[in-house]
Image (cartoon, grey):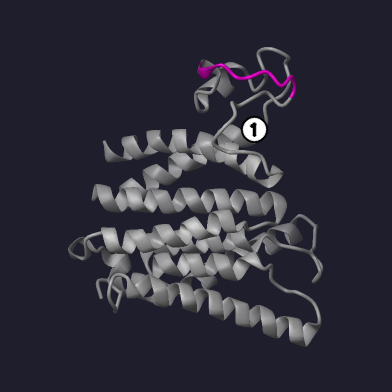
């Protein structure tokens, strides 16, 4: 029942995320203004905004003008639903499941925008940081699960130290790369994103986030090489996407070493 509830909520949230991912890069208002067809500009009726179902029944086209509705919308909705189900299956406690889903939904939006625009807006990384602080205070430490048993300090100190370590570490790496190579190796939003992630996973979870992110990035490079689409050293990669993957997996299963010991019964 919990998985069904968070999955259904994820469909609704995913519909909103799709809207934000379209309007935010354009500088358009997010809350005000009705959704409209990109082809004819007509406002969408409520029954034409049912997540996934409306797209499927209309066969991916506007009922008024026949313009194609991008597949990205139902995919984002399904991804948000999957995140909600995953979080509920991982954590049987409703508070933990909801916290995990909220984290996953924020990371999904950040990943979509960074993948499409190579942009990590402060309007998304700041709420991620603040929600991490709130989660640390609101969740009962007595219900802490295996993934967060590695928290070694107080509930509010942990995210603050994690945020400082995440931002400072990646900012220093970007600074040194710029001094050595004479060009930027990281975007300005990447340190801010890792700082916000540190508010969720704590300082001890940051190495695992970076390991997952690096593995994801290398997997993409390897896949492109297999498809005979090699990448040059100057090609850009949306590192925020890989950081989001690392943050999600670390939150779910904890730092890699401790998670492995937990699976082994250690």
> Outermost residue, left direction?
142
**Residue 31: x %, y % from top left:** 54, 36
Q: Quadrant of residue 130?
A: bottom left
Please tell me whether residue 21 is drawn above or below residue 242 in the rendered image.
above
The residue located at (27%, 71%) in the rendering is: 149
Quadrant where the C terminus is found in the figure = bottom left
**Residue 15: x %, y % from top left:** 52, 34
Q: How many marks?
A: 1
Report the predominant secondary structure element of the magenta stretch: loop
Range of the magenta residues?
A: 39-46
Please tell me whether residue 31 is drawn above or below residue 46 in the rendered image.
below
The residue located at (25%, 71%) in the rendering is: 265
Q: Quadrant of residue 222?
A: bottom right
How packed mark 1 is, by other alpha carbons closer than 10 Å (few <14, some 14-19, many 20 or more), is: few
The residue located at (20%, 61%) in the rendering is: 143
Please tell me whether residue 60 is drawn above or below residue 206 in the rendered image.
above
Which residue in the protein does label 1 denote?
Answer: 71
Q: Is residue 106 within the magenta segment? A: no
Q: Is residue 45 within the magenta segment? A: yes
Quadrant where the N terminus is found in the figure = top left
For the residue labelled by badge 1, is the local secondary structure a helix, a strand or a loop? loop
> Outermost residue, top direction?
64
**Residue 232: x %, y % from top left:** 82, 68
The residue located at (76%, 87%) in the rendering is: 180
The answer to whether residue 91 shows anywhere in this view is no
Residue 46 is left or right of residue 203, and the answer is: right
**Residue 233: x %, y % from top left:** 79, 71
The answer to whether residue 240 shows anywhere in this view is yes
Please tell me whether residue 121 is drawn above or below residue 74 in the rendered image.
below
């Amino acid at each position: 029942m919990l998985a069904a509830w968070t999955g259904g909520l994820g469909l609704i949230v995913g519909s909103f995320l799709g809207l934000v991912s379209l309007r935010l890069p354009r500088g358009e208002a997010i809350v005000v203004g009705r959704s409209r067809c990109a082809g004819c500009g007509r406002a969408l009726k409520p029954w034409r905004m049912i997540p996934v179902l409306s797209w499927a029944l209309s066969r991916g086209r506007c009922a008024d003008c026949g313009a194609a509705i991008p597949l990205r919308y139902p995919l984002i909705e399904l991804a948000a639903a999957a995140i909600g189900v995953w979080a509920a299956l991982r954590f049987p406690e409703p508070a933990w499941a909801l916290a995990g889903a909220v984290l996953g939904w924020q990371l999904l939006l950040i990943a979509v925008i960074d993948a499409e625009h190579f942009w990590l807006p402060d309007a998304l990384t700041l709420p991620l940081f603040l929600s991490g602080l709130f989660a640390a205070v609101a969740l009962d430490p007595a219900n802490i699960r295996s993934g967060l048993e590695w928290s070694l300090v107080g509930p509010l100190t942990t995210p603050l130290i994690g945020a400082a370590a995440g931002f400072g570490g990646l900012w220093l790496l970007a600074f040194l790369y710029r001094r050595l190579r004479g060009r930027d190796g990281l975007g300005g939003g990447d340190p801010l994103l890792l700082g916000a992630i540190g508010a969720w996973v704590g300082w001890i979870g940051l190495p695992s986030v970076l390991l997952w992110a690096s593995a994801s990035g290398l997997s993409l490079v390897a896949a492109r090489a297999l498809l005979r689409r090699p990448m040059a050293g100057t090609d850009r990669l949306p590192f925020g996407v890989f950081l989001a993957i690392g943050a999600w997996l670390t939150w779910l299963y904890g730092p890699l070493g401790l998670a492995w010991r937990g699976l082994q019964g250690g």
